[in-house]
Every structure is written in C-alpha cells, then in structure tokens.
Image (cartoon, helix red, strand yellow):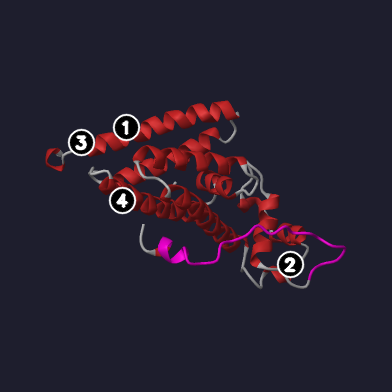
Amino acid sequence: MSLLTQPLAEASQPEPHQVKVTRGAGRRATITKEELFQATLNLIGPQKSISSLSLREVAREAGIAPNSFYRHFKDIDELAIALINRAGLVLRKIIREARLQATKQDSIIRSSIEVFLQQLNTDEGNLGLLLREGYTGSNSYKQAVEQQLSFFQQELQEDLIRLERLNHNKLFYPDLVSKAITQLVFNMGAKVVDLSSDERNQVAEQTILMIRMILEGSRHLDKAKIR
C-alpha cells in the first residue's frame, strides 16, 4: 500500500514499461535504462538480492559490453537504488488507481489488499524486489525501500482523510494510522510470498480485519486522553 510532495511530482512522469531484453549473437552498442532494469530483474529470484550480482553479470544478461553499463549507472548500487525507486513508482500508480475508486473504508482496504496480492502473483518482480531488498538488502537498499514506503504512507494518509470526510468521520493521528497500515501490509506481503493461494487469502482476510481494528480504534481515540 501506500511523505512530501515527491509522489505527486512523480505521478506526471511517464509510466515505466516492461522491456523484454533479447540477446543476439554479438554485443549491442547501446541499451536503455529500462532494458538494464529488466536484465537485472531477470537475474534475481525470490531469495537473491541485487547486491549479489556483478556488473559483468548484468552486462552479459543485457547483451552489452561492461563499458556500456557506465553510460547509465556508475555501479550496481546506483542501478539497484534506481530500480527500487522505479518499482515503488509503478506499484503506487497501480494501487492509487484502485483506491481512487473507493467510496468507503471497507472498499479502500480490500481493494488495496487485493491489488497487493495480485502483484505478488505477477512475474514483473516490482513488489518482490521491494520486499526482498527491504529485509535482506544492504543498508542503502533498505533506506531506499523505506523512502518508497514513506511515499505509500503519505498517499494512503491522504486517501484515508478524504474518505473520512466523505463519510463524516474523523481519524485521530492519521499519519500514525497510515504508517501502521503500511507496515502491516508489507509485513503481510513478506509472510505470504511463499504460501499457497488459499493460505494467502486467509492471511489477507486477517490483515483486513486488523486494519479495520486500527481504523476503528483511531476514530475513538481522544487526543485529550493521551498521556
């Protein structure tokens, strides 16, 4: 699911597209960033961090000479952080579109969870990348993932406030509510990634119930009583 003005600025950028990298008999003279991103995603699996890749591996997968890599990135770490940022942008756009259709809290919760699980079932690798690097990546990768989660959190906070006003309700501490929900959902994603479809659905329903409990508790939380 889904701090600052960056998400709104990013929304006007062109949407990244999946680019299938095809290698010919020889090395290519030029390559785009998107093709380098896809070559990297081709090489990492559920348990493999980008930090385990070498520049030469990525160049070989992309069908280019190592020197061509440097036209876009100075090293693997710069590529990894750019790929994490790209994954967050793609996922926020997908989830934002689903939430904008919601007119009440139940639908915003369920639609976000459903889209989240759908992304786990795709082979594009964006959500898996955030989950993996957020837990097992280097410190710089984890910080990049945390920044993306903060953007998810801000957008969720804005949507929750919008729906609370629409339904004549009020949340206390909407920033903490959105933070708790964001962390809860991403933790769910890390937990269900290796589960069967039925098991995922069971955990998803439990997560939806926990989110409802957070929201209901916030509505009845009187700031004056907080010590």
**Is residue 175 placed above or below 18 in the rendered structure?**
above
Q: Secondary structure at mark 1?
A: helix
Q: Which residue is mark 1?
A: 213
First in sequence: mark 3 vs mark 1: 1
Q: In this rendering, which labeled residue sits more in front, label 4 or label 1?
A: 4
Residue type indicated by callout 3: His
Q: Secondary structure at mark 3?
A: loop
Q: Which residue is mark 4?
A: 162
Query: Which of the pair 223/26 is nearer the observer?
Result: 223
Residue at 47%, 39% in the rendered image: 113
First in sequence: mark 2 vs mark 1: 2
Q: Position of residue 205 (x, y in %)?
A: 45, 29
Q: Is residue 216 visible?
A: yes
Residue at 65%, 50% in the rendered image: 52
Query: Which of the pair 107/62 is nearer the observer?
Result: 107
Residue at 44%, 37% in the rendered image: 110
Q: Which residue is mark 2?
A: 66
Q: Which residue is mark 3?
A: 220
Q: Secondary structure at mark 2?
A: helix
Q: In this rendering, which labeled residue sits more in front, label 2 or label 3?
A: 3
Q: Which residues are magenta?
A: 7-28
Q: Position of residue 45 (x, y in %)?
A: 66, 44
Q: In this rendering, which labeled residue sits more in front, label 2 or label 1?
A: 1
Using the numbered discs, state the Cα–Cα distance from disc 2 to disc 4 in whole angstroms: 49 Å
Q: Position of residue 49 (x, y in %)?
A: 61, 48
Using the numbered discs, state the Cα–Cα distance from disc 3 to disc 1 in whole angstroms: 11 Å
Does the CB distance between marks 4 and 1 fall below 8 Å? no
